[in-house]
Amino acid sequence: MNNWHLILAGVVLLILIVGLVVTLGTGRMVSTKSGEFDTQINEGTQRHPYLLNPVFLVWIIAMTAIIIYIIYLGFHYY
């Protein structure tokens, strides 16, 4: 195994971080707009808006898996 795998893993991690920042920025922009057709949000989601949001859960799980894979490659092959 060569260094290209580690470089590629770093690039993927960078893309994930940039995507998360864009997602968070879009979420803030949308939440500040007032909507006419919005319904009441569940109380559990109101208390934990990021923890119960499926988009953020996917980001967290994907970044965690990629970081674990990068660490695995680093310890296993280098």
Image (spheres, rainbow, N blue to C red):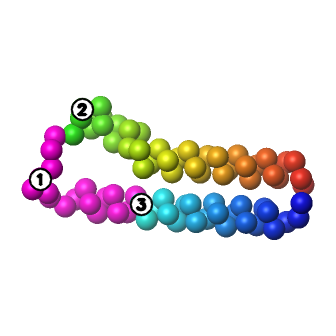
Q: Secondary structure at mark 1?
A: loop
Residue at point 43% right, 65% down? Answer: 22
Picture quarter with the C terminus: bottom right
Residue 66 is left or right of residue 21, and the answer is right
Residue 37 is left or right of residue 59, and the answer is left
Q: Distance of mark 2 from mark 1, alpha carbons?
A: 18 Å
From the viewer's perspective, is the residue at label 3 or at label 1 nearer?
1
From the viewer's perspective, is the residue at label 2 or at label 1 nearer?
1
In primary-sequence order, the first of circles 2 and 1 is 1
Q: Which residues are magenta?
A: 24-40
Q: How many marks?
A: 3
- Residue 46 colored magenta? no
In primary-sequence order, the first of circles 2 and 3 is 3
In primary-sequence order, the first of circles 3 and 1 is 3
Residue closer to the observer: 50 or 38: 38
State yes or no: discs 2 and 1 in contact (Cβ < 8 Å): no
| Residue 64 spot, x, y in % from top left | 61, 46
Q: Amino acid at mark 1?
A: Phe
- Residue 38 colored magenta? yes
Q: Which residue position is annotated with label 3? A: 23
Q: Amino acid at mark 3?
A: Thr
| Residue 41 spot, x, y in % from top left | 21, 40
Q: Which residue position is annotated with label 2? A: 43
Residue 12 figure quarter = bottom right
Residue at point 40% right, 58% down? Answer: 24
| Residue 15 spot, x, y in % from top left | 58, 66
Q: Which residue position is annotated with label 1? A: 37
Q: Mark 3 packing: few (<14 Cα in 10 Å), some, or many (20+)?
A: some
Residue 32 vertical placement versus 76 (above, below) = below
Q: Secondary structure at mark 3?
A: helix
Residue 65 is left or right of residue 54, and the answer is right
